[in-house]
């Protein structure tokens, strides 16, 4: 029997989509499910952005474009980085990608060899561990502790650096905890990377989604010219999850290889999607503060509600749109609690262990949902945890 490659057997999926599939099957059976599992804004793409994409299609902008992206979008992203991160990268550092995930994948493909060590947060976004496993690298987990507001501690990173360490992955604001790292913490990580000659990939997909705090980047130290990579995208704060659009800022030596990866894997990002991205970055930005005001209201409601449930306790996240309650006092494991809520209460959430072993004892709620549904989910949980 013909066998698949070793790498194919090492890569793994994402629990959010697995839970969504289970929830949808229950819905097909006639059960009503409250969806708090998928990390997707509960609003539509702003009209001006959608119109720009449709206009591009009408203008026949549906053909191949340069693999690293349209010049217009790369320039717009270049301006965006200068405005939001405090440095202006060279145009040669700018790469357009079909969603942020390919940016994670390709940046790791260009930096990590079998046997290398990749340091990342746990609980953390599953793609980091999945790609590390696929590449035959060792994942080195840095626990995010509730007593530190789930922020990645530079001292914990330092204690885990060995001669095999090749890459540190940073995600702030963070999925699944909503934590936001401080400038000093991110500066320390950048210093560690320089001291030990390690790459840093900074996943900043939630960069515009913070509450009463500021977003910082570890890429400011070397301006992504030497050893850091900035990843950002349009899915979350422009509500463009299905458009599949993101961008990278990377050292020129890496961009040369990234271009070949893009040619080989996807040829290019869809042209009309990129024109929508130009409008997103250069057009009216009032959508974002309005969206974040709504998210703050939802955050406050779900945090207050979760903290009113016996056995639940939850810190208020400082970014993104996830609540990460501690459920240890329920006496259940994360998986048991998530299953109980899905099959008995009709609530789809993710077990903390979907994001790594240090997620045990927690659940993740995506509160990108209607306020009335947040009230309903709290009511249902209370009924099942009296």
Image: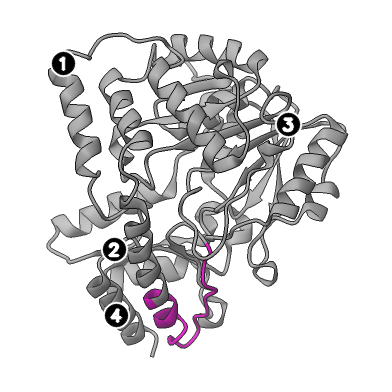
Q: CA distance from mark 1 to mark 4?
A: 50 Å
Q: Nearer the viewer, mark 1 or mark 4?
A: 1
Vertical comparison of 234 with 166: above or below:
below
Instruction: From the viewer's perspective, tell me whether residue 179 is left or right of residue 241.
Output: right
Residue 235 seen from this side? yes
Instruction: From the viewer's perspective, tell me whether residue 52 is left or right of residue 252.
Output: left
Q: CA distance from mark 3 to mark 4?
A: 50 Å
**Any mark on residue 222, and which?**
3
**Any mark on residue 380, and which?**
4
Q: Nearer the viewer, mark 3 or mark 4?
A: 3
Q: Residue at x 76, y 45 (%)?
A: 189
Along the line of sight, which residue is nearer the eye, 213 or 228? 213
User: Hey, which quadrant is residue 146 in on the image?
Assistant: bottom right
Q: Residues within 10 Å of mark 4 (few under 14, many from 20)?
A: some
Look at the numbered disc 2 and give the secondary structure of its residue.
Answer: loop
Q: Nearer the viewer, mark 3 or mark 2?
A: 3
Query: For mark 2, what is the residue?
Result: 369
Q: Nearer the viewer, mark 4 or mark 2?
A: 2
Query: For mark 1, what is the residue?
Result: 59
Earlier sequence position, callout 3 versus callout 4: 3
- Does 307 appear in magenta? yes
Q: CA distance from mark 2 to mark 1?
A: 35 Å
Q: CA distance from mark 4 to mark 2?
A: 15 Å
User: Hey, which quadrant is residue 370 in on the image?
Assistant: bottom left
């Amino acid at each position: 029997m013909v066998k698949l490659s070793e790498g194919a057997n090492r890569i793994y999926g994402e629990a959010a989509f697995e839970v969504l599939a289970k929830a949808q099957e229950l819905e097909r059976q006639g059960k009503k499910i409250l969806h708090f599992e998928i990390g997707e804004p509960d609003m539509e793409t702003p009209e001006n952005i959608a119109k720009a994409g449709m206009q591009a299609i009408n203008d026949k902008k549906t053909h191949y474009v340069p693999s690293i992206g349209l010049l217009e979008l790369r320039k717009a992203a270049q301006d965006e980085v200068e405005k939001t991160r405090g440095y202006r990268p060279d145009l040669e550092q700018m790469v357009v990608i079909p969603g942020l995930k390919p940016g994670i994948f390709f940046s790791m493909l260009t930096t990590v060899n079998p046997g290398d060590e990749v340091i990342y947060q746990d609980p953390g976004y599953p793609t980091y561990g999945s790609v590390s496993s696929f590449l035959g690298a060792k994942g080195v987990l840095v626990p995010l502790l509730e007593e530190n507001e789930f922020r990645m501690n530079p001292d914990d990173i330092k204690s885990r650096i060995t001669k095999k360490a090749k890459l540190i992955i940073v995600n702030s604001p963070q999925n699944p905890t909503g934590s936001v790292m401080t400038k000093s913490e991110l500066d320390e990580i950048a210093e560690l990377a320089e001291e030990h000659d390690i790459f840093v990939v900074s996943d900043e997909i939630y960069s515009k989604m913070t509450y009463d705090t500021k977003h910082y980047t570890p890429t400011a130290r070397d301006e992504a010219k030497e050893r850091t990579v900035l990843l950002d995208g349009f899915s979350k704060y422009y509500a463009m999850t299905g458009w599949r659009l993101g961008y990278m800022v990377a050292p020129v030596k890496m961009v040369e290889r990234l271009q070949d990866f893009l040619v080989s894997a996807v040829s290019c990002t869809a042209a009309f999607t990129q024109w929508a991205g130009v409008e997103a970055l250069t057009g009216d930005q009032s959508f974002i503060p309005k969206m974040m005001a709504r998210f703050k209201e939802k955050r406050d409601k779900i945090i207050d509600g979760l903290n009113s449930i016996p056995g639940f306790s939850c810190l208020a996240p400082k970014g993104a749109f996830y609540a990460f309650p501690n459920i240890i006092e329920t006496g259940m494991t994360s998986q048991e609690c998530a299953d109980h809520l899905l099959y008995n209460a009709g609530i789809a959430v993710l077990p903390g262990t979907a994001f790594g072993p240090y997620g045990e004892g927690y659940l993740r709620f995506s509160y990108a949902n209607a306020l009335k549904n947040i009230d309903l989910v709290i009511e249902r949980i209370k009924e099942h945890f009296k």
